[in-house]
Image: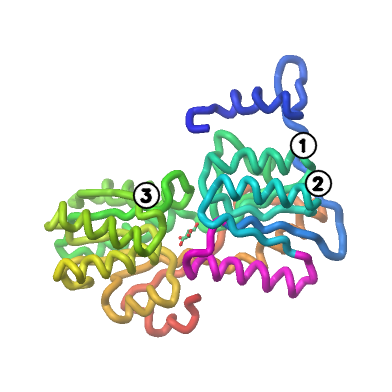
Amino acid sequence: MNRISRRAFMLAATAAGAIAIAGTVAFAELPKLAQKETYKVGFAQTESNNPWRIAQTNSMKAEAEKLGHQLVYTDAAGSAAKQVADVNSMIAQGVDLIFLAPREEKPLIPAVMAAKKAGIPVILLDRSVDPSLAKAGEDYVTFIGSDFIEEGKRIAEWLVKNANGKSKIIELEGTTGSSPANDRKKGFDETIKAAGGFEIVASQSGDFARDKGRQVAEALLQAHPDADIVYAHNDEMAIGAIAAIEAAGKVPGKDVLVLSIDGGKEAVQAVIDGKIAAVVECNPRFGPKAFETMLRYAKGEKIDPMVINEDKFYDSSNAAAELANAY
Ligand code: AHR
């Protein structure tokens, strides 16, 4: 799927059910959702390997239960191929709508298109798909989640104001090909570049995972002993990096500033302890907004292509006061 264009994708999909009109190819309209008291709804989760994912899943399950909807829940265990199969299984089970948290931007396109072809609306949760291959309002209803570019920008802006002479950055990227990894990099790198005076000495994926983040940070700290800032695309990798910094005989927060995104309790506690300098929250409380959007869609209301969650920001000025509110 890497180099496929939307046009090529659409042409290929013609055989699979798209409609050809006067030489052009157009898909049938976005599937509608009938108005009902309760629904049978799919939620295709990408993995459950960190507090953020668990908080998101709990929020979805709690809201479905509160509203009396039946939730068909699947966990792709970190495999895009399994997530595609999970969506196909939901289609076979005849769900009314699918909430999909696509692990990566391109590999989940076939799942979005298969649901559309089966007449089942899809709402993307937290991660998006490649916008050149699938579009909100056409192929899926909407994307609900954080503005990941803004998250990267906010943490970079904090760094620009608070670096105190530190300048050499190791960047720990999230899962390759995922929208948060792409966008958190873009928002951060562009802001740092515009500010000047900083250098990203290494940037490598730690797959949003604690142990991988630790291993990558260990190798990069060895290769770049002068690095004095670690920017991790999520808390798990930031916490892994703290272990790597300490293993290298350095003090996180003093010798090396650690910056993170997610804002789970463990990271906010690390801000209080002085080990993480600042963290942008990525709000995982999706349940109320997801089901409210589904009901608005069923009523025929116009849904914006992006429904953005609000994120908090934690540093030493508010971490202690906010700890109890962190997930
Ligand atoms: O898509 C959001 C990201 O995915 C979170 O930052 C991360 O922790 C999760 O796995």
Q: Secondary structure at mark 2?
A: loop
Q: Position of residue 14 (x, y in %)?
A: 71, 25
Quadrant in the picture for residue 19 = top right
Circle on res. 185: 3
Q: Quadrant of residue 119?
A: top right
Amino acid of disc 3: Lys
Gap between marks 1 and 2, in whole Å? 8 Å
| Membership of 52 in magenta stretch | yes
**CA neighbours of label 3 inside 10 A, class few (<14), some (14 to 19), many (20+):** many
Left or right of residue 34, residue 283 in this image: left
Magenta-tinted stretch: 46-70
**Residue 237 covered by magenta stretch:** no
Residue 144 visible in the shown view = no
Residue name at image x 53 percent, y 50 percent: 79
Q: Hey, what amino acid is under mark 1? A: Glu
Which residue was labeled with disc 2? 32
Task: Assess whether mark 2 and mark 1 are in contact (beta carbons under 8 angstroms).
Answer: yes
Considering only order in the chain, which callout, 3 or 2, is on the residue closer to the N terminus?
A: 2
> Is residue 296 shown above or below 13?
below
Tell me the chief SS of the magenta region: helix
Q: Is mark 2 within 8 Å of ligand 1?
A: no
Q: Position of residue 307 (x, y in %)?
A: 61, 55
Q: Nearer the viewer, residue 47 or 124?
A: 47
Q: Earlier in the sequence, mark 3 or mark 1?
A: 1
Badge number at residue 56: none
Direction from residue 314 to residue 72 in the image, left or right? right
Residue toward you, 198 or 241: 241
Query: Residue 82: x and y, percent?
Result: 59, 49
Query: Helix, strand, or loop for circle 3?
Result: helix
Q: Which residue is mark 1?
A: 29
